[in-house]
Image (spheres, rainbow, N blue to C red):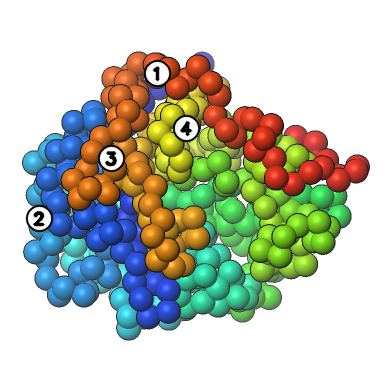
Amino acid sequence: MQMELEALQIWGGAEYTCNRVGDRYIDQMELSGHAHRPQDYSRFADLGLTSLRIGLLWERYESASSWKWTDEHVRGASKAQLEVIAGLVHHGSGPAHTDLLDSRFPQMLAAYAGSLARRYPDIAKYTPVNEPYTTARFSGMYGLWYPHQMSRSSLFRALIHQLKATVLCMEAIRQVRNDAQLIQTDDFGRVSGTEMLRPVWENLNQRRWLAIDLLCGKVDSGHSLFRELLSAGISENEIGWFAEHPCPPDVIGINFYPTSDRYLDHQVDSYPEECRSAEGTFVDVEAVRSENAPVLGLGDLIVEAWDRYRIPVAITEVHIGGEVNEQIRWAASIYESVLSARSQGAQCIAMTFWALLGSFYWNQLVTRENGYYEPGVFDTRSGIPVESELGIVVRQIAKGLAPSHQALQRSGWWLHKDRICYPPMANERVPS
């Protein structure tokens, strides 16, 4: 007998990334002005949202050595009757005196988490580290963010430290309230590729679940990535620590974008230089841009996560750059995917409208301050948030209504033939 699901919750969040490039921090809350506008929370609540991912970031507290800013924003959310989902590190590496490769990182972040929980005991939901696997890749393998390393050993070391920090944070938080929930987010995009690269992309498809496997205490000598962890310098004791301190998420948060799914090709000369992967002698491109890649849907990913862990799932970032009509189409497509997964029995409890105030520099992965801005539900370029027509659709979904807008008379660009940048190679299509 299939369990009856509760009504879908509609969450939200501004873009809270605070990443480090060299010695400079790029703080999205400062760029959008949200850091100095606690009144934004009433705007968010007016959309019909029930919960909000809020960046109560370690880096910001350390730089101020004061709770004043955090007090104002927690108070603003409370006044707007928005439940807080507190994020402590969001694509960051911590204050200037530490980084993701520092063995002290987990304990230091946990100390901050405990202090935060004691000051705000009403907060019951936490994401101590946003997207630990994605952040480990960008900081430890691709060299894009601090500490700008490019090795498997750095990738896995950064991942282990972030996950140990997550466990220790939740232990510290649960000393204050034992019902505190872990909402663990990441981008679980799937990887496909040419047949020659099958061992590579099959390995990467296992690796995208490694963070959750470790948190659940499921990584031992029989795990498919156990030997790879050892070869990267992670000891058996370090791996075993997670089995001794299991901290399974209460909710698995899927952050999903049109470019989340990837396609690998060994025929490197057929692609621009910038498509080459840091992982090996092949290219790594957006699957949506490749004629060869199988077409996979978010609904299937939700079901995959539910079947693998039997832990409730939420879509924790729904956003796309581009004109507002495309944003409306993307929101509607995510909503349809969620309903499809729920109809198949997957316990998907929420979807989250992300980057409500827009985001900066993501066209170059926030590696430089290039002036690029993409609006969200609100456009902040005038200094005052101005709501777009996307807000209409957010309100409809928040009321449990099917999205209705003239933009939906046309499909999104990710379904059009002209999305293809990379032509098919003979006999290299991988079946979906």
| Amino acid of disc 3 | Phe
Q: Residue furthest toward the bottom?
A: 97
Which of the two labelled residues, at mark 1 and mark 2, occupies the earlier sequence position? 2
- Position of 147 with respect to 404 (left or right) is right
Residue 89 visible here: no
Q: CA distance from mark 1 to mark 4?
A: 11 Å
Residue 310 visible here: yes
Crowdedness near tag 1: few (<14), some (14–19) or many (≥20) residues, C-alpha within 10 Å: some
Q: CA distance from mark 1 to mark 2?
A: 36 Å
The foreground one among 87 and 27 is 27
Q: Which image quadrant is residue 396 in?
A: top left
Q: Secondary structure at mark 1?
A: loop
Q: Secondary structure at mark 4?
A: helix
Q: Nearer the viewer, mark 2 or mark 4?
A: 4
Residue 60 lies, in percent from the top left, at: 23, 68
Which of the two labelled residues, at mark 4 and mark 3, occupies the earlier sequence position? 4
| Amino acid of disc 1 | His
The residue that disc 2 covers is 72
Q: In the displayed structure, would residue 141 be above or below residue 345?
A: below
User: Residue at left 27%, top 70%?
Assistant: 59
| Amino acid of disc 4 | Glu
Q: Specify the label residue 378 is tagged with.
A: 3
| Amino acid of disc 2 | Glu
Crowdedness near tag 2: few (<14), some (14–19) or many (≥20) residues, C-alpha within 10 Å: some
